[in-house]
Image: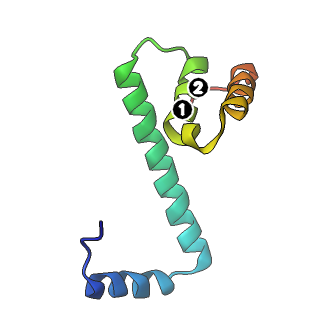
Amino acid sequence: MNDTSSTVENKLFEMMQQKTESERFFMAASMFDMARLVSKAAILEDKPDISPDEARVELFRYWYWEDFDTDDRENILQAIRLINSPYD
């Protein structure tokens, strides 16, 4: 679905082209961080007592589950569970 007029689309493209590569990179990084925060909030709302380890697993399921076959998923889940890093 595309509900954006070609005029607006062209203007947005023009505005983005005026930004430096660095500015565009930091915009994308900021959007990624926001998406991660929203995903984490949804996980915690659905499962408020989830452990940090299982929260990382859920984050993987939210974002990447369909990108991998069953064997790869299992290997990734095992690796995630071995990582001892904070969920933030």
Q: Which residue lies furthest to the front in this view?
A: 70
Instruction: Using the image, determine if residue 45 lies above or below residue 49.
Output: below
Give coordinates of residue 10: x percent, y percent: 36, 87
Quarter of the rendering containing residue 37: top left
Nearer the observer, 71 or 28: 71
Nearer the observer, 37 or 69: 69
**Which colour assignment does the render follow?**
rainbow
Instruction: Using the image, determine if residue 84 lies above or below residue 63.
Output: above
Contact (CB < 8 A) between labels 1 and 2?
yes
Give coordinates of residue 83: x percent, y percent: 73, 24
Give coordinates of residue 70: x percent, y percent: 66, 31
Measuring 75% from the left and 20% from the top, which residue is drawn there? 82
Q: Assign a secondary structure to mark 1.
A: helix
Q: Mark 2 points at which residue?
A: 57
Distance of mark 1 from mark 2, alpha carbons?
A: 6 Å
Give coordinates of residue 27: x percent, y percent: 50, 65
Q: Which mark is residue 61?
A: 1
Q: Is residue 2 left or right of residue 65?
A: left
